[in-house]
């Protein structure tokens, strides 16, 4: 019980400018990491994974052709970054980081077109419908990943990062491959199976670095659990 007559010292709270600077400082690492991964995936988008062709030994329908590229293999690292950011800072800041990364990528693409570095977007980057499908599918997958992690965080610690990465990957694969212009045939079924296996493997393997970083990358107060 507090003694009467003792004045309480008011607790000073950080001002708006201080909170803004803190939030921006926290956004730097995840935004840079997300942009770096997306840039690597973009530059590797036309490099096929030759090992994928060996899947036909299991089933002749699992022919990856040229669509299984190293860019597609690298892309799920986005979910690893989002998981670490969500663990540390929560869903709101992670969503902000994803949004800013898309703004930066869009700004760079616009600057490249304005400066003549990219003269024909459809030929040098991707056809407009396919580019829109990739951006829409990945943005949707990022949102699913962040919300899943925030919903599932808790005990055991591995549940949130595993399910967030797996469900986010499946959301991307489904949204992209189910676009109206995509042909639905045996090749599409094989693609969904291979991509599902890829995202399951990523979700499982990323638990190793996540577990190793748990002691050094602890959630801030108010974001307990995973």
Image (cartoon, rainbow, N blue to C red):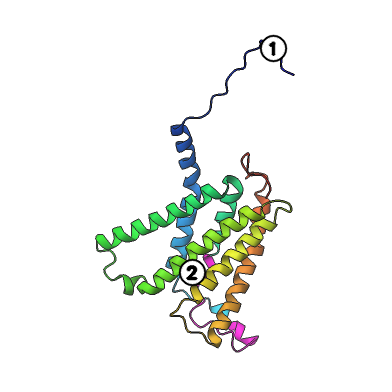
Judging from the image, what secondary structure is the residue with disc 1 in? loop
The spot of residue 24 in percent (x, y) is 46, 42
Which of the two discs, 1 and 2, labels the residue nearer the N terminus? 1
Q: Is residue 185 left or right of residue 217?
A: left
Which quadrant holds the N terminus? top right
* Picture quadrant where residue 21 is located: top left
Residue 58 drawn in magenta: yes
Q: Indicate which disc residue 4 carries.
A: 1
Q: Is residue 208 left or right of residue 25?
A: right
CA separation in Å, label 1 and label 2? 67 Å
The answer to whether mark 1 and mark 2 are in CB contact below 8 A is: no
* Picture quadrant where residue 113 is located: bottom left
Judging from the image, what secondary structure is the residue with disc 2 in? helix
In the foreground, 200 or 146: 146
Q: Which residue is under mark 2?
A: 71
Which residue is pictured at 62% across the width and 60% down the height? 164
The spot of residue 10 in percent (x, y) is 57, 20
Which residue is pictured at 61% across the width and 73% down the height? 196
- The magenta segment is 53-75
Q: Is residue 20 left or right of residue 121?
A: right
Check disc 1: other Cα within 10 Å, few if <14, some if 14-19, many if 20+. few
Determine the residue located farthest toward the top in the rendered image: 5
The spot of residue 129 in percent (x, y) is 38, 74
């Amino acid at each position: 019980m507090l003694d009467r007559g003792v004045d309480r010292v008011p607790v000073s709270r950080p001002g708006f400018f201080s909170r803004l600077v803190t939030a921006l400082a926290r956004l730097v690492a995840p935004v840079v990491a997300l942009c770096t991964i997306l840039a690597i995936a973009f530059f590797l988008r036309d490099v096929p994974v030759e090992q994928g062709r060996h899947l036909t030994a299991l089933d002749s329908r699992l022919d990856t052709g040229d669509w299984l590229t190293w860019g597609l293999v690298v892309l799920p690292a986005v979910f690893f970054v989002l998981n670490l950011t969500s663990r540390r800072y929560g869903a709101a800041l992670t969503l902000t980081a994803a949004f800013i990364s898309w703004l930066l990528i869009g700004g760079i693409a616009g600057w490249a077109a304005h400066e003549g570095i990219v003269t024909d977007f459809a030929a040098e980057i991707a056809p407009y419908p396919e580019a829109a499908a990739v951006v829409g599918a990945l943005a949707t997958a990022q949102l699913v990943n962040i919300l899943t992690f925030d919903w599932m965080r808790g005990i055991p610690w591995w549940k949130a990062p595993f399910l967030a990465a797996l469900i986010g990957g499946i959301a991307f694969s489904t949204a992209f491959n189910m676009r109206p212009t995509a042909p639905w045939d045996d090749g599409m079924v094989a693609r969904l199976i291979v991509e599902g296996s890829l995202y399951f493997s990523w979700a499982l393997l990323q638990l190793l670095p996540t577990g190793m970083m748990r002691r050094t990358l602890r959630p801030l107060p108010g974001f307990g659990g995973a």
